[in-house]
Structures are given as structure tokens and as C-alpha cells.
Image (tube, rainbow, N blue to C red):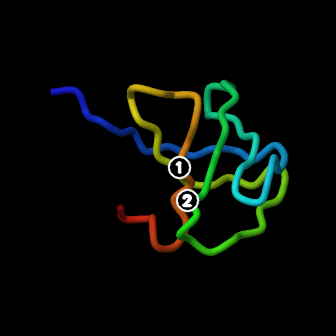
Amino acid sequence: MIPETVDTTVTIRSQHSERTWHALLPNGRPVLAFRPTDTALVTLQEGQQVPARLTVADFSRALLLLGEHAIA
């Protein structure tokens, strides 16, 4: 059975907005990393590696797994 999500690590490249960042997957593919609006704001630095979750239907965006979403 094919999983619905894949957990990985992204490398932050730059901040795009208050809750979104340009990031890279381990294979070098760029993605838009994000935090949901119901979560606390975070400060991330360029080059920082952050755990993330991708949906298999859309590998162009990654949910950052920080704090309350780490186990979701």
C-alpha cells in the first residue's frame, strides 16, 4: 500500500513570508515549506535543517514538523 505522506528533512534557503520558507529537499529539489496558521511563529535560519512532511500527491510543498505538529 502506498503511504499518503513521507517524512523527511528540508534545508531552509530563505524566508518567503511570516509562515513560509523556500527550502530544499535532500535531493536538491526546491519546495515551499510552511507552518499552519494555528501554530506558533518560529524563526528559522538559512541552512537550518528542519523535519518536514510531504504528501505523495504534492511534493512541491512541505509541512514543517516543529513543536505540536511533530507527531501529527
Q: Which of the two discs, 1 and 2, labels the residue nearer the N terminus?
A: 2
Q: From the viewer's perspective, is the residue at label 1 or at label 2 nearer?
A: 2
Residue highlighted by disc 2: 36
Q: Mark 2: few, some, or many residues within 10 Å (few <14, many ≥20)?
A: few
Residue at image position (84%, 51%) is 46
* Badge 2 amino acid: Pro
Residue 18, compared with residue 22, is above or below; it is: below
- Seen from the viewer's position, the closer of residues 36 and 48 is 36
- Quadrant of the rendered structure where residue 5 is? top left
**Pointers 1 and 2 in contact (C-beta within 8 Å):** yes
Residue 45, compared with residue 59, is above or below; it is: below
- Quadrant of the rendered structure where residue 28 is? top right
- Seen from the viewer's position, the closer of residues 29 and 34 is 34
Residue 8, compared with residue 44, is above or below; it is: above
Residue at image position (29%, 35%) is 4
Q: Position of residue 43 (x, y in %)?
A: 77, 68
Q: Residue furthest front?
A: 37
Q: Secondary structure at mark 1?
A: strand
Q: Position of residue 60 (x, y in %)?
A: 58, 28
